[in-house]
Image (cartoon, rainbow, N blue to C red):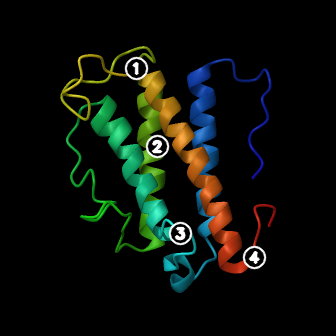
Amino acid sequence: MTLPEPDGSVTDPVARIVEYLDHFRAEVRRVTADLDAEQLSRRVVPSAWSAVELVEHLVHMERRWIIWGFLGEHVVGAEADRDDAGHWTTDRALDTLLDDLDAVGRRTAEVAATHDPLAAADGRGMFADRAERPTLFAILFHVMQEYARHAGHLDIARELIDGVTADG
């Protein structure tokens, strides 16, 4: 996985995070795109998640943190990426999940472009019970590190599934 190279062209830290989020979403798409249904649902790591379940988790994670967390908007099924035991789950097709991943990414970019990065999360959503709520910048940073970690997990899962490495 080749990350965007740091350079002087982006001086706004929020814009840089949005760029990295776009990169990680593209990596998720690249790593999963040519796997068949059996490969996507195969659990190859001891924590017992599949590639398609991880993609579902990423969709829900970003919705939870940006839409429910920062904006305070109601999100139907905010925790629908987990079963009763807390394991990732999905019954949706990869194409649908990737479309949802792109849609939530567009929403994140719009939120980042139209809100003060130092604004605190809305008190009606995910952080309603907290006296101190995280800023948009902190939330974006959290979402970026989740993507970075899970994109790496997908690279490992892909290598275990069919031997394809991050370098192709």
**Residue 42, percent from left and from top:** 52, 79
Of residue 47 and residue 166, the one placed in the foreground of this image is 47
For marks 1 and 2, the one nearer the N-term is: 2
- The amino acid type, in three-letter code, at marker 1 is Thr
**Residue 152, percent from left and from top:** 65, 54
- The amino acid type, in three-letter code, at marker 4 is Gly
- The amino acid type, in three-letter code, at marker 2 is Arg
Say if 121 sits above or below 75 in the image.
above
CA distance separating discs 3 and 4: 18 Å
Q: Are marks 3 and 4 in contact (CB under 8 Å)?
A: no
For image coordinates 52% across by 30% down, the residue present is: 141
Labelled disc at residue 145: none
Disc 1: CA contacts within 10 A as few (<14), some (14-19) or many (>=20): some
Query: Dot 4 corresponds to which residue?
Result: 163
For marks 2 and 3, the one nearer the N-term is: 3
Query: Dot 1 corresponds to which residue?
Result: 135
Query: Dot 2 corresponds to which residue?
Result: 106
**Residue 96, percent from left and from top:** 42, 67
Q: Nearer the viewer, mark 4 or mark 1?
A: 4
CA distance separating discs 1 and 2: 19 Å
CA distance separating discs 4 and 2: 32 Å
- The amino acid type, in three-letter code, at marker 3 is Pro
For marks 4 and 1, the one nearer the N-term is: 1
Q: Secondary structure at mark 1?
A: loop
CA distance separating discs 2 and 3: 33 Å
**Residue 154, percent from left and from top:** 61, 62
Query: Dot 3 corresponds to which residue?
Result: 46
Q: Are marks 2 and 3 in contact (CB under 8 Å)?
A: no
Q: Are marks 4 and 1 in contact (CB under 8 Å)?
A: no
